[in-house]
Image: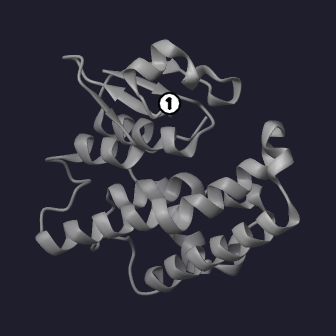
């Protein structure tokens, strides 16, 4: 398999983390969106959405979107719940991550850390991303006060998806000590067998 990714992207980290845990060998091809490499014609021919990550299977078929890649890789493993309800919970949290979490936590970090995004870091946008990111962390914290993980009682793709940007949220100005259940969950995720860091 070939994973087209970018080393500092949380979305790209998700499949790298799961493949490490599953012992799946793969070749990494760095495609840097900061320098426009995702918009090169040869890459757009493979992924018309011009984004990373993208997984190319051994037979040449391709899958884009980080959470779709997670679901493909997790099929038949401990990372995708077998029960219908628990599996629906995993999907619920994957959708939450992309709609209510990543657009604020990841984007605020990008606005504050990537020089090419500095022009977009208006006070209004920083305020909105902080408010909505804190809301997402609050939703997670309330869930984790009663549960060890996000989809039932076991670590799953939902935890991988939410971990990717939550564990670096402080780089975006979020105060994780205000969300103690989230902070404790981060430690549980990192203690799971086969964990690898983002870099």
Q: Nearer the viewer, residue 181 or 55?
A: 55
Mark 1 surroundings within 10 Å by alpha-carbon count, few (fewer than 14), some (14 through 19), many (20 or more): some
Instruction: List the single residue furthest toward the top.
Output: 42
Q: Nearer the viewer, residue 173 or 185?
A: 173
Q: How many marks?
A: 1
Against 180, residue 125 (above or below) is above
Give left or right: position of 20 versus 12: left
Q: Is residue 168 visible?
A: no
Q: Quadrant of residue 179?
A: bottom right
Quick one: SS at disc 1? Answer: loop
* Residue position for label 1: 50
Residue 184 position in % (x across, y down): 55, 72
| Quadrant placement of the C terminus | top right
Against 135, residue 92 (above or below) is above
Residue 90 position in % (x across, y down): 29, 65
Residue 169 position in % (x across, y down): 67, 60
Q: Is residue 179 visible?
A: yes
Residue 174 position in % (x across, y down): 73, 67
Q: Nearer the viewer, residue 199 or 129?
A: 129
Q: How is the image coloured?
A: one colour
């Amino acid at each position: 398999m070939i994973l087209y990714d970018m080393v500092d992207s949380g979305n790209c980290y998700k499949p790298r983390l799961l493949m490490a845990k599953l012992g799946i060998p793969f070749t990494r091809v760095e495609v840097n969106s900061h320098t426009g490499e995702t918009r090169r014609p040869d890459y757009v021919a493979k992924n018309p959405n011009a984004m990373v990550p993208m997984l190319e299977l051994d037979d040449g078929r391709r899958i884009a979107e980080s959470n779709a890649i997670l679901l493909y890789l997790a099929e038949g493993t401990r990372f995708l719940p077998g029960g219908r309800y628990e599996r629906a919970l995993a999907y619920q949290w994957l959708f939450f991550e992309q709609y209510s979490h990543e657009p604020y936590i990841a984007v605020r970090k990008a606005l504050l850390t990537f020089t090419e995004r500095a022009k977009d870091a208006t006070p209004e946008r920083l305020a909105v991303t902080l408010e909505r990111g804190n809301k997402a962390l609050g939703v997670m914290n309330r869930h984790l006060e009663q549960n060890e993980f996000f989809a039932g009682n076991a670590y799953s793709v939902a935890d991988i998806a939410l971990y990717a940007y939550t564990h670096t949220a402080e780089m975006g100005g979020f105060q994780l000590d205000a969300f103690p259940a989230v902070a404790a969950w981060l430690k549980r995720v990192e203690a799971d067998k086969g964990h690898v860091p983002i870099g």
